[in-house]
Amino acid sequence: MTNTATGTLRRKPAQRRSAERVERMLEECARLLDEVGYEGLTTKEVARRAEVPIGTFYQFFPDKQGLVRALAFRNLDAFLARVTATLAATRISDWTEATDLVIDEFVWMKRSMPGFNVFDFGVALAAPGTSRMLDEALEDNLVVADRLRGLLIGLIGVPAGDEQARAFVVAVEAADAVLKLAFRACPDGDPDLIAECKRLVRRYLSDHLG
Amino acid sequence: MTNTATGTLRRKPAQRRSAERVERMLEECARLLDEVGYEGLTTKEVARRAEVPIGTFYQFFPDKQGLVRALAFRNLDAFLARVTATLAATRISDWTEATDLVIDEFVWMKRSMPGFNVFDFGVALAAPGTSRMLDEALEDNLVVADRLRGLLIGLIGVPAGDEQARAFVVAVEAADAVLKLAFRACPDGDPDLIAECKRLVRRYLSDHLG
DNA sequence: AGTTAACCTGAGTCGCGCTCGCGTTCTAGG
DNA sequence: CCTAGAACGCGAGCGCGACTCAGGTTAACT
């Protein structure tokens, strides 16, 4: 069900021990991202903390970028799962409640999921670099917006047109940027900025959705 | 008048030759950023293209990051100068025209200024890394929003409160993210996304300004 | 001309991402 | 049970990039 391994792993861990190792590497990657950021993260240190030899690390992950991407996809899955669950468990009367809820879940993830607030889903993750990386980043970005939109279309009755799709991409991008700012201003996310983020999304989307 | 050298240069170029060298290094830095991005950029190649020995490079710039920051500040100055000039030369009846104009100028810079569209003013520039870098990035970000706001307060009559200041920071952050997206989607900036950016800013700020 | 200080320079250091070939451990056929 | 072969595990080592520093060069003043 998870797409963590899709295109990001060199070899799928077949044995039990291998799977645990991949798990540990991703965990330590997340922890290290929080401690030292993407630039400060070294594959050697990830391997050392996960008690995995560096050679073995590169059996599973194509490169440093790939490791972080794998983590990003895993986090995205976790996020969408939470949103789905919470939406299903909540009575929603209009779409503004839904977007507020999505933002709250995102904030929750940033607060509690190690390594989560390091990502720009699709923006800075692979930000400057070769065209290949840019294409991938763009793709990731659309994936996030698309999956979120699919969720909201299914669970509440938001309209599904090309114009709305673009609006969703824009809203996700903008919200991500503002929340990133909120978490730079304050470790738990500046509450005022989080409130502004909700307002921004509501105001903007009200042009496109009823 | 320019603050390009503020805190980003190790030593101010006193002699004429030195000043030209710094100039050339910044120019080649910008060109290289467009070609290979931040990660792909190497100090050696900047020095080589500018015909400056690598040792001399490090006399003026503290490190690679510092070089890019210096360029960012210079670009910011150029941008604000253009906005000031255009605002002064245009009859503005309400603030929405002003924000549209600012966005148009920003797009113009991204299209024509080498290396300009690589920056997130304050977001990804120093995005992941040590806390020192994060603090600096945050500071940069506020600097941009603050200077823009000062401009608009002076030239048209936007209100100047703490709430409005925060709204400006949010708007700048969001607009930057959306425009970045627009330029990833298309080399000259996707017109639809640029239009959406203007709409986003207008809708959001109308809550805070009249 | 001599003395001193400021400046220039690129070979070299250190640490990173990543590889490659050898050792070891599983699997299958006799 | 033994053995041939494949699959996996491993870490010393390679290439390269950011950055330094000791020695040479130029300028400035007496």
Image: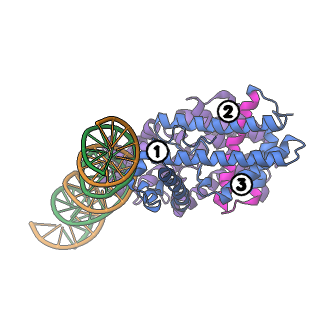
Chain colours: A blue, B purple, C orange, D green
Task: Name the image quarter holding residue A2.
Answer: top right
Q: Do the CB atoms of the residues marked 2 and 3 lie less than 8 Å apart?
A: no
Residue projecting furthest to the right? A93
Judging from the image, mark 2 belongs to the subunit labelled: B
Give the mark, 1 or 2, whose residue is nearer the N terminus.
1
Residue bearing mark 3: A107
Q: What is the spatial separation of the Cα atoms under label 3 and label 1, in whole angstroms?
A: 29 Å
Residue bearing mark 1: B38
| Camera-side residue of A77 and B104 | A77
The crowd level at tag 1 (other Cα within 10 Å; few <14, some 14-19, many 20+) is: many
Q: Which of marks 2 and 3 is in front?
A: 3
Secondary structure under tag 1 reads helix
State the extent of the magenta-drawn residues as a range: A163-192
Q: Do the CB atoms of the residues marked 1 and 2 lie less than 8 Å apart?
A: no
Q: Is residue B127 left or right of residue B173?
A: left
- Please, what is the dominant secondary structure of the magenta stretch? helix
Does A178 sit above or below residue B112?
Answer: below
Tell me if residue A143 can be seen. yes
Question: Residue A170 placed where, x, y %?
Answer: 70, 37
Does A42 sit above or below residue B95?
Answer: below
Secondary structure under tag 3 reads helix
Q: Is residue A16 left or right of residue A200?
A: left
Tell me if residue B171 can be seen. no
Residue at 71% x, 31% y is: A166
Secondary structure under tag 2 reads helix
Judging from the image, mark 1 belongs to the subunit labelled: B
Residue bearing mark 2: B194
Question: Both on one chain, marks 3 and 1?
Answer: no
